[in-house]
Image (tube, helix red, strand yellow):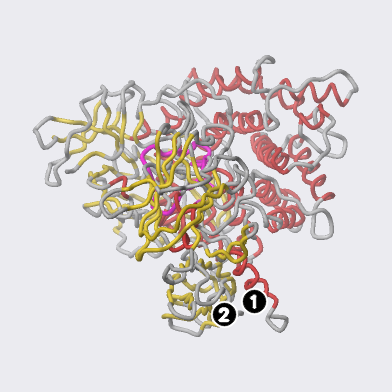
Amino acid sequence: MRNLHPLARAAVICLMLSLAVHISAGEPSEIDIATAATPATSFCSGHETLAAINNGYAPKHSDDKSHGAYGNWPKSGKQWVQYDWLKPISTKKIDVYWFDDGRGVRLPTTCKLQTWDGAAFVDVKDAAGLGLAKNQYNSTTFGEITTAKLRLEFDSNEKSSTGILSWRVYDSGKSPNFAPVVKAGVDRVVMLPSLTWLEGSVRDDGKVKPVPTLKWSKESGPGEVTFSAPETANTSAKFSAPGQYVLKLTADDGELTSAESVRVSVEPLPNEPHLTPIATAPYSVSGKFWPNRVRALIVNWIPHCINKIDDPNLKEGGIENFVQAANKLAKKPAKHTGPVFANGWVYDTVEAMCYALMVQAPDDPAIVESQKAIRKTLDEWVPKILSAQEPDGYLQTMYTIGGMKRWGNKDDHEGFLVGHFIEACIAHYRLSGGKDTRMLDAAKRVGDCWCENFGPTKKPWYDGHQELELALVRLARELETKDGAGQGKKYVELSNFLLDCRKNGSEYDQSHLPVTRQYEAVGHAVRAVYCYAGMADIAMETGDVEYHGAVRSLCDSIVNKKYYVTGGVGSGETSEGFGKEYSLPNSAYCESCAGCGELFFQHRMQMIYHDARYADLFEETLYNAILGSIDIDGKNFTYTNALDSSGKRYLWHGCPCCVGNIPRTLLQMPEWMYSKGADTLFVNLFAGSSINVGEIAGTAVQMVQTTDYPWNGKVAITVNPATTKRFTIKVRAPNRQTSPLYTPTPACSGLTSLSVNGETVTSAPERGYVALTREWKAGDKIELVLPMVVQRIAADSHISYLKDRVALRVGPLIYNLESADQPIEGVLAPTAQLSAEWSDKVLDGMLLIKGAFSDGAAFQAIPNYARLNRGGRSMVWMKDK
């Protein structure tokens, strides 16, 4: 092995360790044949995985879920797991490592081992052991049996659930040989001239020979594939040409072989410069849709958040922590309130306040009065926040007050908080029109503090919760615009460094692999999409081909396998996170902050690849996953967004991270509506508005949209350049099938009509945009009509939860049935007639979908964002059989 390539040598070692050839005390080389079994259970909780019990990994303790765990929370009482083999095996010993997290899953009170006698499960005779000890394998021995099925049956106490981390079944020497179990890894995208990292795995029972022979090969594809170490599970592959490839990992144990394939899409690196975002500046909204939504945020929700955060007795901690930190810096007594990340909702609310003050609504007295109060509070809060910044720029109130050692615990959100602080500072600077630099200067100081302490020749570090990575790039761009080229370079480099430090950790915070080798969306959903958005920023700023491949792969992983029809992400099957592929239960977690992060990610992907499909995605997320997080009146919010729920929204939350994140995201409308290149403006969203988009082709441009979209598809866009100039406007032609997981019928993508100054445009869309290139002068008008029909949505058959179910949509809006209107368990026949009708009587007015169930009973559906404003139950997916 000494002569092997280092990568190959390491992979062989890892393979030998991962193969299920276990060493037990006093019994060397025992062969675990559980690896060849198919597990089954009475019940497995959504956030656990049954496959963990025979994946070949040995736990370190009873709460070691690093390689998965089986648990049956919230069930209690008698439960079981069993193994099924294709051929009978012989055994006289098992080992069980019980799962106990000290909370809802605890050790069982009793257990027994059963075997299948051909007609029923019966107790294994003379079983000695059946231990229930924590933090160890519990061995059980018995007279030799031959069986194709073994079952463990166990009981919990009255309140707790039970679980297993590992269940080994040892061959007595008479079991047949089973073929190796091969996993080739997840499908992915590779950008030329980069390579892809193949993280395969093989489990084997160790018969015939202890380690199977492995071989990677090209099964199909247009070019050559070069593997750095084709005989190892973990290797890399390079491709000679773009196209679709299938790579195969084969394992041969000397008698039997098995294989699995992985699909790789190889693409050329984009040769166009990335687009730039539109800086949110004073703007107005109009029409029948957005003014009500914006008004609710400014008049009700943000003032509510201010009142909570301004309360010195708020147990979650608010603005008072900054006052206390200033006291500590002045050597006065000080006390911190709330968790270590308590500064986060303060910063997000400050940012939301700044954007709220950019909304121009002089004819709405309630907005004007609320903005006056918001301005007064902002002017009071800014000095308090700045007073808590330490002399070298460091800012974290709990650490300052407690005198804690900086950067000693990656889970204390130091970077997460700094990131939100920087973004709030940028918003404040923009609000002032660049005249008030106090907050931006403070952002530079805190950025410089981090640059002084971290970098390639300094201390490695990554934060357990991503956000700083995004903010540093945003700060860099702001300073490049303000102070000139090169002024933001070090902040981009720091962001890149912090991302590159993520490795050898856990899936929970996306540190399990180097980020450029992550191709599947895993772990805590908010952390994940923030991470992927930060990675997209680095791909934009550096052009790094491995970053490009990773973000394309991660985007495809979400959209093709782990994406809700509402644009939400995070099934909650892991802690607030992503579950397995196609596992999308209607009890979705879909945290509101995850919806915000998903928008951030897809928005950056649009800027990298100039492709409208990413705008289609973030429009869907905006209108469904985020907008419905706050009620119609703007007085209550929800942390999670299930697709079938009776849950009420609420005033506050024990972890109020979403309270400021939701409004700061919704009120950055200009940034989501447009993006631009040097001489091209992309129209991504349609909303009644007047927005200054900055300079295009050397002249300032104002865009005025007149529309009631999404209530109807008519949109008029008036283009107002300061001087007549030739440039291109690219208008999105929406594709309503945003994900292959969901197929809408009838198809109604694209534009029904498009004209400029009354002249019809017949150009076909490219990458989802129709390009309009001409000399633009003030007053030129683009008019378009988007098709707005009622669509039925069928889910991919892999999503078992949605069998015989259908969802409805009009334009970007997903619709819900509500028990406030009718019983909702009726069946909608595939041939039932559906219509969209306006109603002034439901909430603040909206387009309803109306029809009849199979039994003739009438029903109506309301937009998902308006769900649960009237009590009762609300659900997206209705029966169609």
Q: Tell me if residue 496 comes above or below residue 420 in the rendering.
A: below
Residue type at mark 1?
A: Ala
Q: Position of residue 237 (x, y in %)?
A: 56, 76
The span from disc 2 to disc 1 (Cα, nearest Å) is: 8 Å
Label 1, on which residue? 8
At label 2, counting other C-alpha atoms closer than 10 Å, the crowd grade (few under 14, some 14-19, many 20 or more) is some
Q: Residue at x 44, y 39 (%)?
A: 154
Q: Residue at x 55, y 44 (%)?
A: 524
Residue type at mark 2?
A: Glu
Q: Residue at x 40, y 45 (%)?
A: 620
- In this view, the residue in front, 150 or 353, is 150
Q: Quadrant of the N terminus?
A: bottom right
**On the rendered structure, is 872 left or right of 655?**
left
| Mark with earlier residue (2, 1) | 1
Q: Position of residue 54 (x, y in %)?
A: 49, 56
Q: Quadrant of residue 798?
A: bottom left
Q: Position of residue 85 (x, y in %)?
A: 37, 61
Mark 2 element type? loop
Q: Tell me if residue 842 comes above or below residue 426 in the rendering.
A: above
Q: Position of residue 718 (x, y in %)?
A: 42, 46
- In this view, the residue in front, 235 or 76, is 76
Which residue is farthest right?
331
In magenta, the rendered stretch is 576-603
**On the rendered structure, is 104 left or right of 837?**
right
Label 2, on which residue? 231
